[in-house]
Image: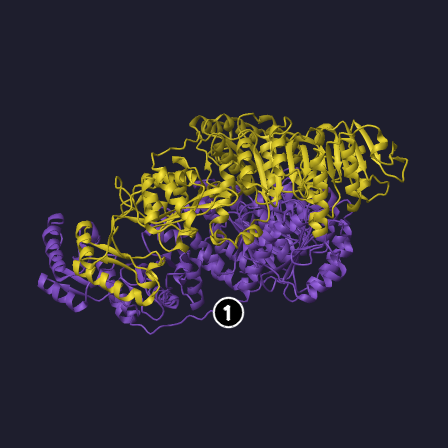
Chain colours: A yellow, B purple
Amino acid sequence: MDLTSLFEPRSVAVVGASRQKGKVGYEILTGLVNGGFEGQIYPVNKSCDELMGLRCYGDLREIGQTPDLVVIVVPSQAVLGVMQQCSALGVKTVIVITSGFKEAGPEGRKLEEQIVKIARTGGMTLLGPNCLGVLSPANKLNASFAGMLPKLGKIAYLSQSGSLLAAIIDMAGAIDLGFSKLASIGNKAILDELDLLRYYGQDEQTEVIAGYLETIADGDAFVREAERISHDKPILLMKAGETGAGAEAASSHTGRLPGIERAREVVFERAGVIRCGSIKQQFDYASAFANQPLPKGPGVAIIANTGGLGIMAADAIEREGLQLARLEEATTDALRSSLPSSANIHNPIDVLGDALADRYEYALDHILRDPNVESVLVLLTPHAMTECDRTAEAIVRAARHDKPILACFLGSSRVETAIQVLRKGRIPCYDSPESAVRVLKAMADYSRWRNRPKRVIRLFPVNRRKVEKIVERRLRTGERELGELEAKETLEAYGFVTPQSLLATSPEQAVSFADQIGYPVVLKIWSPDIIHKSEVGGVRLGLMTPQEVMDGFDLMMYRIPKKRRDAEILGVLVQEMCKRGREVVLGMHRDVHYGPLMMFGAGGSMVEVLEDAAFYLAPLTADEAREMLKGSRTYRALLGDHGHEGVDIDAIGEGLQRLSQLATEFPQIQEIDINPYMVGRQGTTPIAVDARIIVDQPT
Amino acid sequence: MDLTSLFEPRSVAVVGASRQKGKVGYEILTGLVNGGFEGQIYPVNKSCDELMGLRCYGDLREIGQTPDLVVIVVPSQAVLGVMQQCSALGVKTVIVITSGFKEAGPEGRKLEEQIVKIARTGGMTLLGPNCLGVLSPANKLNASFAGMLPKLGKIAYLSQSGSLLAAIIDMAGAIDLGFSKLASIGNKAILDELDLLRYYGQDEQTEVIAGYLETIADGDAFVREAERISHDKPILLMKAGETGAGAEAASSHTGRLPGIERAREVVFERAGVIRCGSIKQQFDYASAFANQPLPKGPGVAIIANTGGLGIMAADAIEREGLQLARLEEATTDALRSSLPSSANIHNPIDVLGDALADRYEYALDHILRDPNVESVLVLLTPHAMTECDRTAEAIVRAARHDKPILACFLGSSRVETAIQVLRKGRIPCYDSPESAVRVLKAMADYSRWRNRPKRVIRLFPVNRRKVEKIVERRLRTGERELGELEAKETLEAYGFVTPQSLLATSPEQAVSFADQIGYPVVLKIWSPDIIHKSEVGGVRLGLMTPQEVMDGFDLMMYRIPKKRRDAEILGVLVQEMCKRGREVVLGMHRDVHYGPLMMFGAGGSMVEVLEDAAFYLAPLTADEAREMLKGSRTYRALLGDHGHEGVDIDAIGEGLQRLSQLATEFPQIQEIDINPYMVGRQGTTPIAVDARIIVDQPT
């Protein structure tokens, strides 16, 4: 969608402009005029001839021109009429500021449907209703009631909350942060987060995209678009309503899974989206991404004029999984030669409490030249002799284009002007070493994401036709869960090894099969009417001898028909017992928004599995499968430890990739749980011991 | 230790006072004079007659009086001489500001030892060396070079970093936070964190204690003192160097345990100490604890003028484990009757973007009266019409003594004066809803800690004498690990049930024992020389038949002597095999600082155990034992889920309490691991299957 007329109109009409201070129609017009908009402004209001020195029109037709953009501020009942006028005049872009639509109940919803209809029929682009408007500093356009037009910068912002946007502009002013464009998307009747994201993605003035969202209409499309755009521009997303969304989802089967929130996070992570825990954190991130280069790696150097601050930063670096850069000898030699002898010349570097600006500059200069240093954190507390401003100037001078420098000057009035110097010099300054380190972590993660290897999905040779038949048959019968044999066949068709098993109809046959398979064996009752076999005593594990097999067979045949008189019993399955190796779980759940979520976890009861589970979106690359394994808490145990041999990690990874292929090729499959998936030591083939597969018509 | 002369001296001498701006001796004297100290000030400096209008003395003796407090700022080489003078004059309290002591290397360390000796001999109290000094706003005493004396308030601060203290005072000024006393403890040559903590604990002007520490000299004493003081005054502790300390500890056995950091946290938690993740967070906490009452429970009500902020706060409340208060009908009725129809009258309450101060005041007033509401968070973003200042005034008016109110006014210049109004009115205001919620969480946790039931330690009847004998014998031999039988006897003496086992010396005897115990059984090689039995094939599990027992016995006797020619083999242990129930781990590790740390975790390999482990300090109450269980991730699985029966939770709790008693009564026992501890369903007795016990001379 072309949003040029929204952000760069040559003429704007304000329908509902007002001369009464405090009214939204006044604020919008004032914003436009005071922002210095250089195009035509047409106030529209029946009861005025002039507003703020501009000719005021009785209605849109009177203008005699078709404005590029019409901002509507009239009461909700009157919006429909104005929209019809817009349509008649061929207006292509409209902002409806007015509230009282979908958010206000059933009547408002009806009204909103009507204006959407007019807009669609007239081929109009509509922002709102119930929104704050748009701002575009580059064009001196303030078509909003957010207050002052912010400084020009490289950050584009989109917000689902109008009032939050106003606060954000106010906060940005205080820390000298500039914006390319800002929009409040309100009820998202037509334009939504996806349209704005796309537009910001291709906007040449925008280098960083930030947003506040409560809902995402089309999660899948949003994530795909975000992934594409993240290659060039970091996307900083504050998503609220997470727990609310969790509550909503709780009605569906998966809502109960404790891992589902983590799963959604993974979706954004894969797309390179940088999640922000609060608006404050979003600001922290934005000021670094907009002003500093990305680090090439995790190695951080710290310069401080007090040991305490350096320790706090080092603690945070370790907690966040970054690294204290190991300085080269040339660097420590240089530091030793010029810093006082009691200074710490190793990272974290302590230039001591009596350091003046020159000592900081010298240290910073040498550290930036060290190839092991990938980012620098400069910390300062004001001592009586500290040259705060001059130190800030020195940092600004030392800054280069290839390594990010962040600062934390702790204090308030004593460091106030120094912090302004830093900000003017594009060095972000934070309120604690911990906040600064979190920013470095976000930058390092994003940098690694940008440089990640190209994704190659391995395709295994499989028997797709066979699974098609099984799935089709299931969908015809209306029973959503595949039977045990069908599930087994499905997995085998995709290269999984399942336990050997044979259907016996007599005790003698069961013994003969058991002899053939090898002891111990498992017996399972076989009936299309019995799904939960163990509940009726239909599973007997670890049978060691022919006698036990015979006893087990007879006991099932004697007891189960008494419990389940209706059940048609076809026989008893004699199955290989997998007793070697560790039990893990492979799974897939098709999320309604994001598609097939792959799951890996330690074996055991379902609760334990989910507590430990790692999630990722199919299709999986080999690297991603391995990352999933690493993401689970059971990973270290799988690698083995003293006394326990490790298992074949790659074999699990392959299992995940095969399952991912199955999920990708069959959108009808809604859920798969291979539990347990028995894995042995290096070189052995894992066995998919039990599986549950649910199909449904794809949505 | 009486620190009255340190914080409330009637006369202060400054040895090394200077007229040269920028010199520490100048800053100290200026601080004293400008702070308005009302007692006698004696500058001491050979080369001056007068300083800042005060008579200046050539040395301490010239004064003719013994000052209550002497502040020493002379170069480190000269400190010794001044200390000797102090001693001769009977000075009781000294602050050594000068650096160049222990922190500067071996020579400095020697110098420090000398001044400590003089101080101890003369019965002097010494703060420092290498410190910033002390400040006591109530006495207008600024015996430091921290800059301005801060505002008087209820917070006492102690800092191991002097320069951090200066920054803290600067930051506190900006948010109108006041202090009762502040001290920089420097090298802690005599006075340390424990002395200051004790003093602040009994100081009547102090209601909140905050501190920044890098090391704690006597962890055990500190924690005990902190626990006592926390009953009356919250202690907000920022502890840096955690990861450094972790690295240091890594050389010892326990340093490798991934749970040990959590374990240390638990120690502070039990003492009621409130840990702060950063100085910023410490400020967040301090301003609430110093200005607002504690909440009675976890129920939070939110009032906002924009949905987005309310959602963010609600998300944070759920994440932090607090609760959105459920409003009573009377409250919602009252809100419905006066708020606009589109306002949200349920928690989080949305008073809408056009809310003026009166709407906030009305809502706040009704919410505070609701018995389900235990704390209130007031959120505001500035809209064009928002009355920020008047809303702040309304909140201040509405504040009561029984429920905390915190605020977050999002924005900068637009809310600046409103935030000042809030702060003057003692309503803390935060930079994000998330920060505010974290403060409420800290307050609710502390409130719960203060009201926790009295700790009652259950004492089980045990055979203490028997364990004494075993431990004494072990300590005599010098071998630290108890043998398997000794460990078994120790546990049995404390009421644990262990597997039945008998020592067989022939295959026939083994079979006869197995028949007696019941199949399946375990065989274990029995030799004082073989500790890791499985490594030599000395453990055979799950033997089902007499034949298997006989084969197993013979195979061990044939193979093991070949592998371990030196080992004296006494026979083979035939042991009951515990196969019913779930495996968990009970453990104890005696921490060098904090004493016996109890551990509980899921069974499995050691890595898995530690990943999941919950820790607490012995002796344990029944409640604490249960909390430990709840703190482990395996807890939900232990309770049981669909298909899996739960286990006897109380029986595990009792096991932990018995182990806690053993650890408490035997300081010689350094480590215990009962792994696995096999627990069955409700009413069954758990079995301590295997155990490892290490003893040593208590330190």
Is residue B516 or residue A699 the one in the foreground?
A: A699
Rendered position, A477 above or below B230: above
Label 1 sits on a secondary structure element that is: loop
Q: Percent position (x, y) of residue A324?
A: 46, 36
Determine the residue located farthest toward the bottom in the rendered image: B461
Q: Residue B462, how many percent across, how many down?
A: 31, 72
Which residue is rendered at x = 77% and y = 37% of the image? Answer: A71
The total number of labels drawn is 1
What residue is drawn where x is 30% and y is 41%?
A: A648
Report which residue position mark 1 lands on. Answer: B453
Q: Quadrant of residue A654?
A: top left
Chain of the residue under the numbered disc 1 shown in the image: B
| Side of A46 where A559 appears, left or right | left
Q: In front: A30, or B400?
A: A30
Q: Is A598 displayed left or right of A99 in the figure?
A: left
* Mark 1 residue type: Pro
* Horizontal arrangement in the rendering, residue A61 relative to residue A132 (left or right): right
The answer, for residue B56, to whether it is visible in the render is: no
Q: Which quadrant, please, contains the C terminus of chain B? A: bottom left
User: Which one is nearer the viewer's eye here, B413 or B310?
Assistant: B310
Q: Residues within 10 Å of mark 1 (few under 14, many from 20)?
A: few
Left or right of residue B508, residue B111 in this image: right
**Measured from the top left, where is residue A149 in percent x and y?**
74, 35
- Who is closer to the viewer here, B397 or B617? B397
Which of the 4 image quarters holds residue B396? bottom right
* Quarter of image, res A208: top right
Residue B326 appears at what percent x and percent y? 62, 62
